[in-house]
Image (spheres, helix red, strand yellow):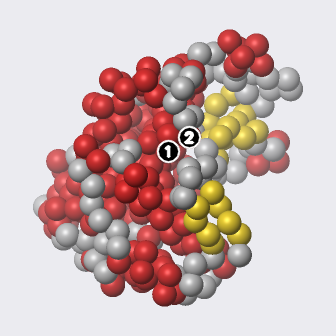
C-alpha cells in the first residue's frame, strides 16, 4: 500500500482503496459553500477526492472493476462533483484575486494556495474518468448536467483566448525563475491549472455529446451544447490553432505538447501523428455540428 501525503497535518490518503473504504468515502462526500473553501473540513474532503481520483485512474488503467465509479452512481454523488466544480471556478474567479497577495506571503503555508487552485483540476480530472460511462451521465440531475455544459463552454472559451497566450510563451530561463516573485509564481500556477482544466473540458464535452447521442442525457443538454453554448463554434477554431502544442525555443528546438500538466518535447518520429486531443476536437466538431443539430431540428 502506497501512502500519499498532501503535506497537511493529519491529511494523509492511501491507495489502493478497498471496496468498503471507497464506498464509505464516497457516501460521506458533501457539498460546500463558497465561504467554506479552504476550511479544515473542505481540505479533508479534498484529500479524500485525491485518493478517489487516484483509485479511479488506477482501476481504469488496470481494467479492473471500477469501484469508484460504481460508488458515485450508487450514492448519487456525481451531481455533487459538478456543483463542486462550479463553486470552485467561482471562487477562483472572484475570491482568489482578492486573496492572492496574502496567499503568496512568506508566512503562508505554500501548500495551501496550491491546493486551493488545484482543486478545480482535481474534480475535473475525476469527472473526466467517471463520465466515460453512460450510467454516470444518467445519474446526474438535469441541472448538474447543464451546469457542466456551461463550465466546459467557459473553459473552451478561455482556451481559445488566454489559453493561446499561455501556450505561446517561451520557457523560462533559470535566472528568470529565480527572480520571479511568489505572487507571479502563483499566477503562473493558476494559468497552468486553468490550461489543464480546459484540456479536461475537451474530453468531458466529448463524453457529454456521446451520452446525448445515446439518450443517456436529456434533450435540454443537447440544446445547451449545440445551440445555447454553441460548442462547435468554440471547438473548430481550437482544432485549427491547437493551443496544446507550441514551438520549443530552447536548445535544439522542436515542438512541445501539453501532457500530464507540463510541456513535453514531441519526438521527431511522432511530429505528424494525430494527437488524442486533436482527435477529440475533430470528433466533437463533427458530432455537435452535424448529428446534434439535426436532432434539435
Do the residues under discs 1 and 2 have CB atoms within 8 angstroms? Answer: yes
Image vertical order of residue 184 relative to residue 57, above or below: above
Q: Residue furthest right?
A: 252
Q: Please state the horizontal and vertical placement of residue 196, each as a whole percent of the image.
A: 51, 44
Task: Using the image as rendered, state which of residue 282 and residue 195 is in the foreground.
Answer: 195
Q: Which residue is mark 2?
A: 111
Residue 90, label in figure:
none
Q: Is residue 4 left or right of residue 86?
A: right
Give neighbour class at mark 1: few <14, some 14-19, many 20+ (Cα, 10 Å): some
Please give the name of the residue rendered at 22% of the width and 62% of the height, measured from the top-left corner: 144
Q: Quadrant of the C terminus?
A: bottom left
In the displayed structure image, the side of residue 16 where residue 24 appears, left or right = left
For the residue pair 223 and 88, the one nearer the viewer reads as: 88
> Where 273 sits versus 176, above or below?
below
- For the point 65% across and 40% down, which residue is it? 262
Is residue 171 depicted above or below 179 in this figure? below
Q: Is residue 227 in sight in this rendering? A: yes
x, y (%) of residue 88?
A: 33, 45
Residue at mark 1: 115
For the residues marked 1 and 2, what is the alpha-carbon distance in whole angstroms?
Answer: 6 Å
Residue 65 image position (x, y, % from top left):
55, 87
- Examine the rendering and report whether any part of residue 192 can be seen: no
In percent of the image, x 82 and y 42: which residue is there?
268
Seen at 71% across and 45% down, the residue is: 272
Task: Quadrant for residue 210, please give it.
Answer: bottom left
Secondary structure, mark 2, is helix
Dividing the image into 4 quarters, which one contains the N terminus? bottom right
Amino acid at each position: 500500500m502506497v501512502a500519499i501525503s498532501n503535506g497537511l497535518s493529519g491529511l494523509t490518503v492511501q491507495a489502493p482503496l478497498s471496496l468498503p473504504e471507497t464506498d464509505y468515502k464516497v457516501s460521506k462526500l458533501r457539498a460546500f459553500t463558497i465561504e467554506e473553501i479552504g476550511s479544515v473540513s473542505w481540505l479533508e474532503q479534498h484529500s479524500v477526492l485525491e485518493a478517489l481520483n487516484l483509485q479511479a485512474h488506477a482501476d481504469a488503467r488496470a481494467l479492473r472493476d471500477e469501484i469508484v465509479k460504481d460508488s458515485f452512481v450508487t450514492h448519487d454523488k456525481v451531481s455533487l462533483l459538478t456543483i463542486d466544480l462550479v463553486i470552485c471556478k467561482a471562487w477562483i474567479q472572484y475570491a482568489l484575486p482578492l486573496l492572492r497577495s496574502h496567499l503568496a506571503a512568506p508566512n503562508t503555508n505554500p501548500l495551501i494556495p496550491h491546493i486551493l487552485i488545484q482543486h478545480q483540476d482535481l474534480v475535473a480530472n475525476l469527472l473526466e474518468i467517471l463520465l466515460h460511462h453512460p450510467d454516470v451521465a444518467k445519474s446526474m440531475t438535469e441541472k448538474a448536467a447543464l451546469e457542466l455544459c456551461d463550465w466546459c463552454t467557459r473553459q473552451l472559451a478561455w482556451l481559445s483566448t488566454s489559453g493561446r497566450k499561455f501556450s505561446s510563451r517561451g520557457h523560462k530561463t533559470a535566472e528568470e525563475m529565480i527572480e520571479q516573485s511568489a505572487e507571479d509564481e502563483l499566477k503562473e500556477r493558476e494559468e497552468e491549472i486553468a490550461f489543464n482544466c480546459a484540456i479536461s473540458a475537451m474530453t468531458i464535452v466529448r463524453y457529454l455529446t456521446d451520452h446525448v447521442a445515446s439518450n443517456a442525457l436529456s434533450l435540454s443538454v443537447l440544446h445547451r451544447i449545440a445551440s445555447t453554448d454553441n460548442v462547435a463554434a468554440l471547438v473548430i477554431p481550437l482544432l485549427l490553432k491547437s493551443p496544446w502544442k507550441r514551438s520549443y525555443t530552447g536548445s535544439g528546438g522542436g515542438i512541445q505538447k501539453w501532457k500530464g500538466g507540463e510541456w513535453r518535447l514531441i519526438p521527431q518520429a511522432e511530429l505528424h501523428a494525430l494527437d488524442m486531443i486533436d482527435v477529440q476536437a475533430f470528433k466533437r466538431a463533427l458530432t455537435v455540428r452535424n448529428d446534434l443539430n439535426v436532432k434539435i431540428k
